[in-house]
Image (cartoon, helix red, strand yellow):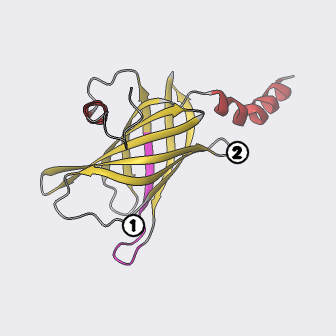
């Protein structure tokens, strides 16, 4: 009987993932494999007309100055239950140089419950371009209930009239 319940749990895990709600605000960090640098990272996911949409917010620290990038992202759930987040468009930043437009990030994440908290955790990779090499690392974000201390939510609410920002009502 013990093995039967274990087997059912393993077989039904992908179905349980589909039933989980991934909408909302997620905060945590990304860690680059090569430099071991940890960057603050936020994601907001919403669902409209049966499709997920989202935005990401990443901070970079260069020479003691904090820079940010806000991107529109495509959100999907793979057949195996993985949560896929893919950069679509950089919509705002304060980078010191013009950003290279062809660099995209792809996150492949698992949804888990750790200590009562919903967590998205997994790998990220950026594409290689003629000017930049591919980067990879880990993403770990936890679902939070409040948007009070979220720079991403402040930005989205402030710019809600923009046609690119349809996630926040």
Is residue 139 within the magenta segment? yes
Label 2 secondary element: loop
Residue 114 numbered tag: none
Taking the spot 34% from the left edge, 56% from the top edge, the residue there is 36
Q: Is residue 146 above or below residue 156?
A: above
Camera-side residue: 38 or 111? 111
Q: In which quadrant of the rendered image does the C terminus lie?
A: top left
Name the residue that disc number 1 marks: 102
Is residue 138 within the magenta segment? yes
Work out whether residue 115 can be spotted: no
Return the disc, 2 or 1, that comes first in the chain's sequence.
2
Work out whether residue 40 can be spotted: yes
Marks 2 and 1, how far apart in space?
28 Å
Q: Which residues are magenta?
A: 129-140
Label 1 secondary element: loop
Q: Describe residue 41's horizontal placement relative to residue 88 as left or right.
A: left
Name the residue that disc number 2 marks: 79
């Amino acid at each position: 009987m013990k093995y039967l319940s274990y087997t059912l749990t393993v077989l039904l895990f992908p179905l349980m993932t589909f039933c989980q709600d991934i909408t909302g605000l997620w905060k945590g960090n990304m860690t680059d494999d090569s430099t071991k640098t940890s960057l603050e990272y936020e994601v907001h996911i919403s669902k409209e007309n049966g499709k997920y949409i989202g935005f990401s917010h990443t901070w970079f620290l260069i020479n003691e100055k904090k820079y940010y990038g806000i991107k529109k992202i495509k959100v999907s759930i793979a057949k195996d239950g993985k949560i896929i987040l893919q950069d679509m468009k950089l919509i705002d930043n304060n980078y010191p140089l013009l950003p290279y437009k062809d660099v995209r990030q792809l996150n492949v994440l698992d949804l888990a419950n750790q200590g009562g908290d919903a967590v998205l955790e997994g790998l990220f990779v950026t594409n290689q371009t003629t000017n930049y090499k591919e980067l990879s690392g880990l993403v770990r974000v936890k679902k939070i209930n409040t948007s009070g201390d979220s720079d991403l939510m402040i930005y989205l609410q402030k710019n809600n009239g923009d046609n690119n920002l349809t996630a926040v009502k």
